[in-house]
Image (spheres, rainbow, N blue to C red):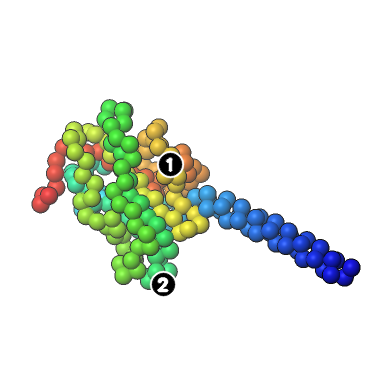
Amino acid sequence: MYGRGNDLGERIMGRIRQIILGVLLAAALSTFACWFTSDNYDGNYIAGVNNFQEHYTEGQSFQNAEYHNNRYVALPITVYVKVHSINNETPTITRAVLQYRVRRNGSWLTPWITVRTITNPSATLDYSVPVPLFGNGTIDPKNLQSEDEIIIRYYCTNGVIQSGDLNDPLNSINPNSTEYANNYSNTYTGGWTPPFVFKVIYNGERRVGW
C-alpha cells in the first residue's frame, strides 16, 4: 500500500510540473508578442539615410524626440540605425532585418523586400553612434521614377520584444512629415511605430560614385 501511495504522489507531482511548465511557456510566448515601448526601445531606431538625411532628432525629453519623413533622397540608399548596447560592448539585439517597399501615386509597386537579415550583430562595431548596420548603398530599387515613395522599416528583437510584426504589410501606412516619440501606442498597424519606419521620396538622381 505504501508503494502505491508513493506512485500516486509522484504522478500528481509530475502533473503539477507539467502544468507549471505549460504556464511558463505560454507566458514566454505571449511576452515575445510585445512591442518595443518608450521604456525599452529608446536605444534602437532608424537614425537617417545617406549623408545625412535625418530621421531622428533628439528633444529636450524622450517624449519630444521627433521622427522626420518625406525627405528627398538619391539612390542607392544607406540606412543608419542606432543599436542599443550594454556597456558599449554587446548589442542587446539578437536579430535585425532591413526591408523596403515602393509606392507610386498611392499604389504599391512591390511587396516588402528584405535587404539583409543579421543574427547577433557583431560586438566590435561602435554602437555609441548610428551605424550602417546593413551595409552601404544596399537599397537600390530599379525602374524608379522621381517622386516615388520608398518606405523603409527596421525590424529588431532581443528575443523577448520586437519592433513590429514582419507579417503585417502596412498597406495603409502614410507617415506624417513629423512624428513624435510620445505617439507610441501602435501608431501604425502590427505594432510598428515611428522610430522603426521611415518614408523617403526618390529625387530622380543617383549619388556620386555609385
Task: Work out whether residue 146 can be spotted.
Answer: no
The three-letter amino acid code for the residue at tag 2 is Asn
Judge left or right: residue 118 versus residue 163: left
Give x and y (percent) for residue 197.
Answer: 37, 45
Task: Give the numbered dot on residue 167.
Answer: 1
Front residue of 117 and 206:
117
Looking at the picture, how far across and down is residue 37, in whole percent? 49, 52
Residue 151 versus residue 59: which sits nearer the camera?
151
Asked where in the image residue 143 lies, by quadrant, the reply is top left
Farthest-out residue, right: 1
Residue at 16%, 37% in the rendered image: 204
Seen at 40% across and 37% down, the residue is: 169
Q: Is residue 205 above or below residue 9?
A: above
* Residue at mark 2: 87
Q: Amino acid at mark 1?
A: Asn
- Looking at the picture, how far across and down is residue 131, in whole percent? 29, 60
Identify the residue at image location x=35%, y=69%.
123
Q: CA distance from mark 1 to mark 2?
A: 33 Å
Q: Could you tell me how many numbered marks the image carries?
A: 2
The answer to whether one can see residue 7 in this image is yes
